[in-house]
Amino acid sequence: MITYTFLQHYWWFLISLLGGVLSFLLFVQGGQSMLFSLPRSEGQKNIMVSILGRKWEYTFTTLVTFGGALFASFPLFYSTSFGGAYWLWMLILLSFVLQAVSYEFRRRPGNVFGTKTYDVFLFINGLLGTLLVGVVVGTFFSGADFTVARNNITDIGSPVISRWNNGWHGLEAVVQPRNLVLGIAVFFLARTLALLLFINRSGDDELTTRSRRMLWYNAVPFVVFFVAFVVWTFLAEGYAVDDAGHVYIQKYKYFTNMVEMPAVGVCFLLGVLAVLYGIVRTLACGNVRNGIWFSGTGTVVTVTCLLLAAGYNGTAFYPSTADLQSSLTIGNASSSMFTLQVMSVVSLLIPFVLAYIFYAWRSLERGHTTAEDAENDGHP
Amino acid sequence: MEFLTASLVGWSRAQFAMTAMYHWVFVPLTLGLGVIMAIMETLYVRTGKEEWKTAAKFWMRLFGINFAFGVATGLVLEFQFGTNWSNYSWFVGDIFGAPLAIEAILAFFMEATFISLMFFGWKKLKPGAHLASTWLTVLGATISALWILVANAWMQLPVGMEFNPDTVRNEMDDFWSILLSPVAINKFSHTVLSGWVLGGLFVTGISGWFMLRRRHADFALRSMRVGTVFGLVASLLVLSTGHMSAYNVAHYQPMKLAAMEAHYEGYEGVELVGVGLLNPDKQSWDDGVQPVVGRIAFPKMLSFLGFSDFNAFVPGIRDIIEGGYVQPDGSVALSFEEKHERGKLAIQALADYRRAMANGDTEAAAVYKEQLRQNYAYFGYGYIDAPEGLIPPVGLTFYSFRGMVILGGWFLLLFAVLGFMAWRRDITRCRWMLWAALITIPFGYLAGEFGWVVAEVGRQPWAIQDILPVQAAISSISAESVKLTFFIFLVLFTVLFVAELRIMVRQIKKGPEVQDDACGTDNVKTEK
């Protein structure tokens, strides 16, 4: 029997999965953040851009889909977070606008600003895109400063339902220590995945060797910051919601969720192990090139499970630090049953979408990318 | 530019309008040029002639340059529904969000995936598979247009939903009526076809430039022929869908139609103003001053366009405010005062219902709920305190409509004459016509922007027709914040637009012989 509750959980699962896939695809941003530090020549930089340039649209599209799916399935989150944390989202948007044109423009004759400017744009997106997306996800666990009052709509002079309670409009989340720790972890994760991808795809030996060396300097901080975030979050208070929809503080809530949902807890652990296995194996064995597939898959699973823990098992996925009862849960923030049903039918097409993406990826990724390939591809 | 005052609503609207207008610089060319390059590649696959492949690759390069900016502005638009119109996002997100999500799942991934195969797959795919990738890229872009236009059409004609006072939002109850509403179907076809017209203008204009420079004669003639036929067919279809647009506006948004025509006093057998100037002495909707001077008009044509009846009554702005006329469905129109009162009643009933529910008084709640249901059709009028608030900017709407229609007529004529010359005569001898084709390219963009101004400015003050005015749809942020992001986006988009224009011009100047980049390096046949 498909109930409203089932559909709300199903859509939170899809949102979580999209978040996991997006985290993996942020390797594009991670690679961009190393455009000025990893390559030793223009040719190597072009190889990096070529490898990333064939994938940036997937990351971008996943971000758009993440936004669209949130809008459709949890519109109260869309209106509360986007309208409230205005500056945080605007910075993310700006950085992605810079990215969208840069691959196409950077080496085109007549691009006005020169290649280096567009490379700087890519770097900015690589830095801000990862850091700030991590900060946003951090607020799912640490909360945000908003109130929701549906009765406001009947106040003709001031009808806005969701309101932010400080003038920083999201910038305050960046300096919240736990959010920042997750942001930094995501930044180093993206760089780690990018290095694993370069090792897998590059046909330039020196670039591959340098990627292996750089992996140490990025994987270690990633692990440190990620473990710090997880331990901090598991030991911290969480935001629980009872059957009546009443939100309250619960000690060790997110750790408890992992224990009370053993499938999620086990998958989370397996995901973390897969990420670590991909990294450690690549570092330990000089000829291993497939670490990206272990770490990539592990990233998808780990982040999906983290987000499931943020919303399942009676948890407020977007807690309000200003008014506990304004917190958003998958029960009070979701679309109607009818809309979720319609969207669920559409979601049945997702495997078909994944199939043609797989076909396209396979078709284009035969052999390693060399300097010659980079010269001849679509991003001159 | 009244809206550029320091109001939050004004700046929020300005920011959205600016982003949308930049977005619409790139999207129509993607829609139109995409089909043309796919047709050329189809001709290549069917005939095996390398010349068609050369032509397809050339237009594909320009398609690629144009594509990225559309993606960037599209992302900003999507997120602005949340950042700047948060109340809207909650109030109708249950309905509006679904098309956007479906667009992302069904269309964006299709575009993103097959555009990669189209650009990078020339040497890695068989010709048939590559052709399929090209068509699927175009299909993805068109499906994307479908869903966002369905969403937009729903704002103009909100159907398939019911207001839920417990959640304080409108909830979808009939997906098909949203997808297949007459406004949605017509808006999709009219908008996509206008993109095709722009594609035709772009290709014929650039081909004309090559002919003027006496370069790549064979390529230019092939492109000119495809471009003119494609553009002519698209223009004729735009004409017919334009008629349907007028019909829909007359039935569902009479105030917009009145503003498009500066039509203040209703009567039967209303003329259509061809050209004319708005009378600066017209200060108010009820001052009786003649609104248009120096006009050339087509008798009874507005009645025909709006109602398929030369003698139909078309209400003017005054009639819509004062009410009392018979509407197309046979009912008598309410005045603004009556709608305003019923809107306030609906809002109050909602407040009372929620209070009663909070107090556990279900009997009273049922009474208020019924009161709300009976008056909900006028909910948005409760936020508007004066009849002037119902009138969209007449000048902008009036002149934009004339600009769109006149330019549309010019495009039709141009395609017909260019096509005749390209297929039956030596078009290269008719240099003024080639110049005309080239110079017309920017007017193609302008016509599209005019169309959107008519559609969006003309429906003010409504974010959702009759249900939610823009002032009740915004986010709670400071006007200064929005003002700042407006200028940041304005500078960013403008700077990148200049870069894109220069890149595009340089790429065009290179001509089709260049062996580089986007389309691989395999044996591009040169024409000297």
Image (spheres, coloured by chain):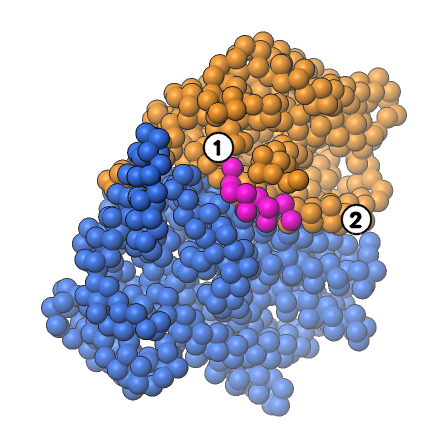
Chain colours: A orange, B blue
The span picked out in magenta is: A334-345
Disc number at residue A332?
Answer: 1
**Pointer 2 chain:** A
Residue in the picture at 52% in, 24% down: A243
At horizontal 82% and vertical 56% (from top left) the residue drawn is B125
Q: Quadrant of the N terminus of chain A?
A: top right
Q: Which amino acid type is shown beneath numbered disc 1?
A: Asn
- Residue placed most toward the observer, A81 or B428: A81
Chain letter of disc 1? Answer: A
Main SS category, magenta section: helix
Query: Is residue A264 shown above or below B208?
Result: above
Relative to A163, B384 lies left or right: left
| Circle number at residue A359 | 2
| Residue B271 among magenta residues | no
Q: Is residue B21 above or below residue A238?
A: below
The label nearer to you, 1 versus 2, is 1
Residue B373's spot in the image, x, y percent? 35, 51
Q: Amino acid at mark 2?
A: Tyr
In the picture shown, does residue B240 fall above or below A223?
below
